[in-house]
Image (spheres, helix red, strand yellow):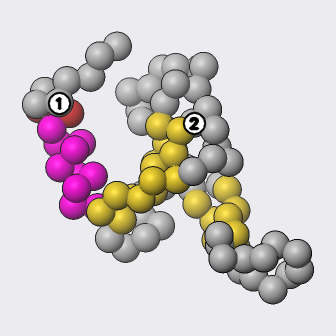
Amino acid sequence: MTWCKSSYSGGNGGDCIEVALAWRKSSYSHDDGGNCIEVAPGFLPDAVPVRDSKDPDGPVLVFPAASWGSFIAAVRTGDFPVEG
């Protein structure tokens, strides 16, 4: 679990709140080198945060949940093939 402060937080005092994200990798990921993405589903009601596992303190992309679901469905049906 990772604790994150708001990007609007000045960070100099304790006048902010932090939220916890439970990041996870795909069960299909067998890569120990960090060449994966991680998701934190269920954190936001209609969105899915995604980050690069090699840079856990780096930027986070947030996709609409419906779009993320469509992407995953396309990968599973082979419409969006995964190279590996």
- Depth check, front residue: 24 or 59: 59
The residue lying at 78 percent from left, 76 percent from top is 10
The residue lying at 21 percent from left, 61 percent from top is 66
The residue lying at 34 percent from left, 58 percent from top is 63
Residue 27: x, y in percent? 41, 32
Q: Is residue 19 left or right of residue 27?
A: right
Location of the N terminus (image quadrant): bottom right
Q: Is residue 37 left or right of residue 58?
A: left
Residue 15: x, y in percent? 81, 86
User: Circle 2 is placed at which residue position?
Assistant: 53
Task: Locate residue 75: give its quadrant.
Answer: top left
**Is disc 2 surrounded by few (<14), some (14 to 19) or many (20+) residues within 10 Å?**
some
Helix, strand or loop for disc 2: loop
Helix, strand or loop for disc 1: loop
The residue lying at 45 percent from left, 53 percent from top is 61
Identity of the amino acid at label 1?
Answer: Phe
Task: Locate residue 62: give its quadrant.
Answer: bottom left
Say if the magenta span includes residue 66.
Answer: yes
Q: Is residue 83 left or right of residue 38?
A: left
Q: Is residue 29 above or below residue 56?
A: above
Identity of the amino acid at label 2?
Answer: Ser
Q: Which residues are magenta?
A: 65-74
